[in-house]
Amino acid sequence: MSFEHVQSRWLFAAVSLGLAVAMLMLGPGIALLATEVAIMALFASSLGFLINYGGMVSFGHAAYFGLGAYGFALAAAKLGLPLWLAVVLGPLTAALGAVLFGALCVRLTHIYFAMLTLACSEIVFTVLFQAYDYTGGDNGLTNFMAPRFGLSPQIYAALTVAIVALCIAFLARIVRSPLGLAIQAVGEEPHRAAALGFSPRLVQLVACVIAGTLAGIAGTMYSVFQGNAFPDYAGVGITIDALVMVVIGGVKGFYGGVFGAIIYVLLKTFVSRAFTHWELVIGLILIAVVLIFPTGIAGLLQKLGLSRTARPSGEQHP
Amino acid sequence: MKLKRGGLLLATLLAVGVTTGPVQAQDPIRIGYAADMSGACGSLVDGATKAFRLGVEELNAAGGLLGRKIEVIERDTKTKPDEGAKEVRDLIVNSKVELITGVCSSAVLLAETAVSAELKVPFYSAIGNSQTATIEKGQPYFWQTNPNVLMESIAVAEYVAANKAWKKIAPLAYDYEWGHTSVKAFSEHLKKLRPDIEILPMVPVKLGETNMTSYITAVLAQKPDLVYGAIFGGGLVNLVKQGKAFGFFQQTSLVTLTTVDFLQTMGGELPEAGLHGFARAPFTSLLDNPKVKSFVQSYKARHGKDPDDWAVLAYDGLMFYAEVVKAAKSTKADDVVKALPTVKYEGLRGSMTVRGLDGQMSAPSFVGAVIKDAAYPFSIMKGATRVDASKTLTPEDFIKSARAAAK
Amino acid sequence: MAAQLLNGLTEGMMLFLIASGLTLIFGITRIVNFAHGSLYMLGAFLAYHLMPMLGGSTVASFASAVLLSAILVGLLGLVFEVLILRRIYGADDLLQLIITLALVLILRDVVKAIWGANDISVPMPASLSGALQIGGTFLPLFQIVAFAVGLVVITLMVSIMRFTRAGVLLRAATDDRGMVALLGINQAWIFSSVFAVGCFLAGLAGALAAPFGNVNYLLDTNIIVMAFVVVVIGGLGSLSGALIAALSVGMVKGLGVIYFPRLSTVLIFLIMAAVLVIRSLGRGAISK
Amino acid sequence: MMKIRQLHAAYGRIEALHGVDLDVGEGEVVCLVGRNGVGKTSTMRAIVQELIQVTKGTVEFDGASVVGVPSHDIIKRGIGYVPEDRRAFASLTVAENLRVVRKGAGNGQWTVDGVYALFPHLAEGRKRLAGVLSGGEQQMLSIARSLLTNPRLLLLDEPNEGLAPKIIDEIIAAILKLKQERVSMLVSEQSLRTIRACGDRVVVIDRGASVFHGTAAEFLGNPEIARQYLMVSGH
């Protein structure tokens, strides 16, 4: 799924369109599940972009998911704004959050970056949880709209798939653009990138804002999907889920997040329905997956020759 | 919002259309039991699930309901609102359940009641409660068979007001909505009953905190006659154990939520005096009638320990539903909802009804001193007062005005 | 206020016990062990299980239960490291993270399967249940004991680090673990033993704290967050930093309850963020 | 004793070496010469499997391949490595730095006293933290530390880089002393001092490949080569 060739771009568009149309023919139960998968695929891809291209492992990506959800839900429920406006405000809130937190976090590298993102998302979570006069606290915001704008599960699933496909196509374009190359260069070797004339921090900040905004879109779509918002949406649990998706999808390239989301959401859903001790089963499966396919599903596909590039290369020989 | 009504209708038709096909008389009644089995509520749900399963077995052994067997589909909400909503949607859309129950966390409850309203499937809460779900966000398909936090706080305030020795009261509460609501309702009602009482500033406690020593020192420094603790579960165990080490119960008294599972956990470790509790259904305070005896005995025979409050509540909730179905002679949502307020239920906790306006059951609360009793390996609320719902139920005008304000 | 400071100090020492193993493991192996809280929890459950077998709630049986639990948790860590973690050193760091997350899930469920979901109370040994009274302040004997154990652990660790070759190796590996291999030393056994010792410390902290509070399967998440905060504030991999951070966090918490009660939850994360940012400013200044 | 043929190696996706041939004989000092960034350090790293992956070609030591062998085992087989940036353990004292190496490693010829005798400077400051040592002292420490593994082949990556002339003299003296002790050495260099002082043979690296093999005399007698492949002309 490399986008350097026109054919693959058309292929991607065709597959996305096909998927969106297919959503209309599903039963409502499967359509609901597919919607969740698609939203998580976008969220995981945005984190995968940050990790695999920007070289920044975030432990606090859920902050933007939560801000996206609450930006929308607060605008709709508390400010009484029309839904179309609220839907725009969700990702915008996440983008603002990403500018603020990103500016702080890009000062740090590696594990310290990860820990600062964790602190930021815990702060967001705590504020959402404790400022209950505004946010509803742990009771969240509910009953302020018909879930999915009242659309049928199938239509909302098709809409979600289409939006997610657009977002991922956008990410793919970014990755190929000069900006994307700069992000990769900084991600791989900040010092060399600096020598090439980039301001590494600025480039990283831009990457954070892109990832944060896309995570915010996912959060807003999730809030619309559920018709509610809860502090959990900014909780560390969602970040961890996304990290797991990125890893089992393949720690190379952002589309690993898509594979990861499909596998992990289905796995969690069906294992937890089938087993009382589902956490044990999932834990064992995760260990097995990591030991058997350390390169993730994308890496496996690449090994099998089903995918050409595991990681679009920004530069060749030094 | 009007614009969207067409879409909503479409959604409902698509989603529910499949569920309302002709039902054979022999088809089982499917109940979706979406409970917070893992995550923050897991420790409370355990006893409830056991009692719920017991109740279903008993009903099936007696031939089921309306000649139909009951089939339960269990799901784990992981104590996450979105997971709860997801599982409930799936239970209704795919598994075609006719009733949803099992919830414990108020957040999950609020997420699930929205789905129940959207898809018009009856949903009741036996162990979780939320006054928001019955008051501001009340919806016809939801009812709640345990007392809410407002009712409980009023019951405790009545109990505290009766003790003239308590003049300075320090609230110590979890720093989130439930804690603050509970302290507010308690303080307001107590002030009404005893204007002479001084209520000290509340000490907010971080949720999930394992070390309570700072809070204990802070609350003791205020030298209160009584500490009102809006703390439950593991946090309460921490508070009592660490409090004992600080001589808490020599310096003051504590009134807090002491459900049977907490008492069982603490075993012989609770202080001899100074601990007062409120609870929702302590089996030791229930009426001495054959129904209660039979339930306690069969639960104990099955699980080797006495049923906790959650078990009693879960059993009562299920049996009430059975009565409603019998009265409605149907499991259809609208029939059930119509029959709901007409049933006078004789349950483990006595005689109760569900109010049509808000779906709140006239559930009693129990308040009393926690003391050691030779008959049990743990302290109990011996001789606790049963505070009837007639004293605590939120007035109808209040609900109407709250709903009007929410709109 | 003095009471809160004293309190904070003893609470801080318990935090240090929790954080010490986490920071030790990170310092050498660079593994962010998300399962540290789970191992703490396992230690508490093992102590609960072993105490009755070792003679009930006396100080001697408590002490031996604590030690035995810690050893068992350490052994589990060793097995886990040798069987699973060792296979993915050198692979992407994220894989190790996922492996430790998997351990969190597994341990939580195993604990639930064995000991149930309900809260458990480990009885406090009678002779530890009293309190010393200093001025108007009560200081629970148990916290004093925990403080003493903390001091013993610090002394032992410092002695090992200062005076033994193992300690020299550990410090060398913290500085530059690649270079240690380039001097002919097989890192594998350093990693295994460090991981085992780190797990031992988690088990020790959990077992030791068990009678002082509630034990249930949710302990893992409650503990790991505080452990991370302490380790990050102290500087990842630094034992002395963890000690200072733990004592400071304990005291800030104590004072926070008095001066900004509603902020107390968010406060520690604000401090953590502030420390990280300030440290980055400092580093920037130095590199200029 | 070491034979490298057509060595290719890469940092991740980025190939740094594409075809290095190199031999070091028993007791021989071979100088690896080339400009900055042409692959001298990468060659050294590839031999001890540090940070770089060998993708093609062979590295044999005592007739056995060391490709894919873990670093610590390569060291145990008798190759010592003194990296370009010295990598002294900064928070350890000099004595502790030496203590890191297992006592009596290899044939046990070199002891702590032995290396102190080689570098008296170190003996004086044995209680100082390595982090506060001068560059030259750190270099001595790094060589001393590596000697304690009792290597038969010592890889010295730019040992004189950035050092004062007086210190360079000391280092070169030490290299000569080691040569007398029959320690084989591979020394990378950008200047010609070591070659003049003790080089037996010279290999020139350019853009990741070896481009010249010859004796020190051949190399020094042909200033064209030095001009072409070295930044500095001989001094």
Image (tube, rainbow, N blue to C red):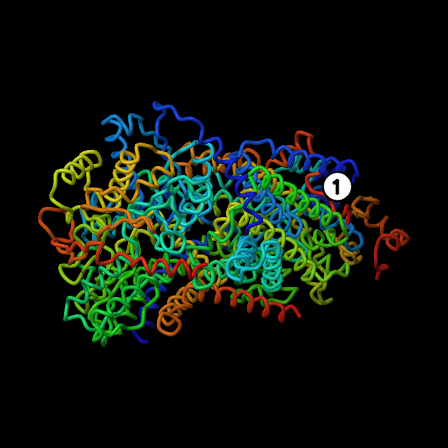
Q: Farthest residue in the left direction?
A: B374
Mark 1 sits on what residue?
A3
Residue A26: quadrant of the picture: top right
Three-letter residue code for mark 1: Phe
Work out whether A85 lies above or below B295. Answer: below
Q: Few, some or many C-alpha atoms within 10 Å of disc 1 (few <14, some 14-19, many ≥20)? A: some
Residue closest to the eye, D104 or A3: A3
Q: Circle 1 — which element?
A: loop
Q: Is residue C240 visible?
A: no
Residue A297: quadrant of the picture: top right
Classify residue D161 as left or right of residue C128: right
Q: Residue at x 75, y 44 (%)?
A: D17
Q: Residue at x 86, y 48 (%)?
A: D218
Classify residue C6 as left or right of residue D182: left
Q: Residue at x 19, y 46 (%)?
A: B351
Work out whether B61 lies above or below B7. Answer: above
Q: Position of residue C203 (x, y in %)?
A: 35, 49
Residue closest to the eye, B27 or A18: B27
Q: Position of residue B187 (x, y in %)?
A: 28, 68
